[in-house]
Amino acid sequence: MNAILNIVSPKGKYNRKEYAIYGMLIPLGLLALALINIHPILTGTLLLLSIVVLVFSSVKRARDTKYNTVTMIVLFFLPYVSLVVLLVLLFAPHGEKVSSKSSKVLMIVVIGFVVVILGILAAVAIPKLAAVQQEAKAVTPQSQLQ
């Protein structure tokens, strides 16, 4: 029981191997169990538990890397960026905190990644929005006639 509480606890640090096991494999296993759809309450509980284990293990791993822990955790909650953060945490070297230059470089790379993703989404969404607006304008007069 103490080992399970240690996995779910945000205290301490994880090295790469521990993060790969506790931060990747256990949440994926819990997610796989949740997808079986045994019971709705059990499914929701397993999904929530997998998210908690993933977040807390990412906090532990971020403490063991040279990157700023708060920055990594904030980036972890951004869509699409979280995948990059998970990979960075998985492959980041163990070490003491170094100059903030590497943290700034990581932040610039992640912001660039976010801008590219948002640009792609905007390029797809804006024409679709215009088409839906034109369709709504064409349908509105017909519905007012009835």
Image (cartoon, grey):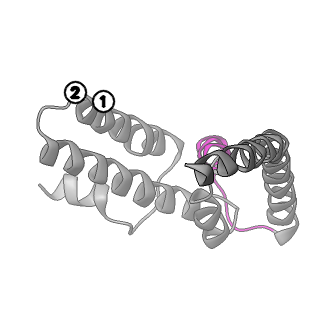
Question: How far from the left and from the top, in percent, is residue 64?
Answer: 57, 59
Mark 1 closeness class: few <14, some 14–19, many ≥20 residues within 10 Å: some
Question: How far from the left and from the top, in percent, is residue 39?
Answer: 11, 38
In the picture of the structure, the residue carrying the numbered disc 2 is 36
Q: Residue at x 69, y 50 (%)?
A: 141
Judge whether residue 79 can be spotted in this image. yes
Q: Is residue 19 left or right of residue 114?
A: left
**Callout 1 secondary element:** helix
Tell me which corner region of the image, top left, top right, bottom left or bottom right, holds residue 102.
bottom right
Q: Are marks 1 and 2 in contact (CB under 8 Å)?
A: yes
Residue 131 image label: none
Q: Quadrant of the N terminus?
A: bottom left
Question: How far from the left and from the top, in percent, is residue 103?
Answer: 79, 64
Q: Residue at x 78, y 52 (%)?
A: 114
Q: Residue at x 35, y 57 (%)?
A: 52
Q: Is residue 11 left or right of residue 60?
A: left
Asked if residue 79 lies in the magenta stretch, the reply is: no
Frontmost residue, 42 versus 127:
127
**Callout 2 secondary element:** loop
Frontmost residue, 34 versus 99:
34
Frontmost residue, 143 versus 100:
143
Mark 1–mark 2 distance (CA, rounded to whole Å): 7 Å
Magenta stretch bounds: 83-98
In the picture of the structure, the residue carrying the numbered disc 1 is 32
Give amino acid for label 2. Ile
